[in-house]
Amino acid sequence: MNTKELGNFGEKLACEYLVEKGFKILCKNYRINFGEIDIIARKKRKLFSRTDKTIHFIEVKALLGQREGIFPEQHVNSKKQRKLRRLAEIWLSKNKFPSDFPYQIDIAGILIDSQSKKAKLHYFSNAVSGD
């Protein structure tokens, strides 16, 4: 499995997980010159319900095989976190959301066992805080 296939597989698993948890996928692989957001989602709203309006920007990190003490989500360093916050703000602005609209950045860490090809997904909600 090459890097692109691994990324696509991880994003597919993350989307399935989100849909199962009641999210609606708004966008996948949002790209601009500055960078990319893997998944943009929102909790499905129920009729006559005051559900959470928060937009979730999800960074997916997938690794094939465990490296000693290294987990996929650890690859989202402070530089990547700053970039994700900026990308989220750009997306909100381009889609005409007010500047104070609630959003959060989540991380889906996916570890794939190289022998069995089974995957474990760990979801970190609101994993990236503001500056």
Image: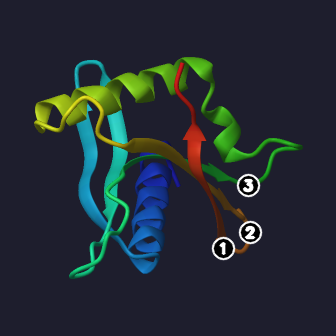
Which residue is found at the position 24% from the left and 26% from the top?
90
Helix or strand or loop: what does disc 2 sit on? loop
Is 63 left, or right, of 37 in this rendering?
right
Give amino acid for label 1: Lys
Residue 109, image x, y percentages: 62, 52
The part of the image, by quadrant, that contains residue 22 is bottom left
Q: Residue tagged by mark 2? A: 115
Residue 38, image x, y percentages: 37, 45
Q: Residue tagged by mark 3? A: 65
Which residue is found at the position 66% from the left and 53% from the top?
64
* Above/below status of 104 relative to 99: below
User: Tags 1 and 2 in contact by the CB under 8 Å rule?
Assistant: no
Residue 12, image x, y percentages: 40, 64
User: Rounded to the nearest whole Å, what is the CA distance between mark 1 and mark 3?
Assistant: 10 Å
Is residue 60 in view from this perspective? no
Give amino acid for label 3: Gly
Q: Nearer the viewer, residue 124 or 120?
A: 124
Quadrant that contains the C terminus: top right
- Classed neighbour count for the residue bearing mark 3: other residues with Cα under 10 Å, few (<14), some (14–19), many (≥20): some
Label placed on residue 118: 1
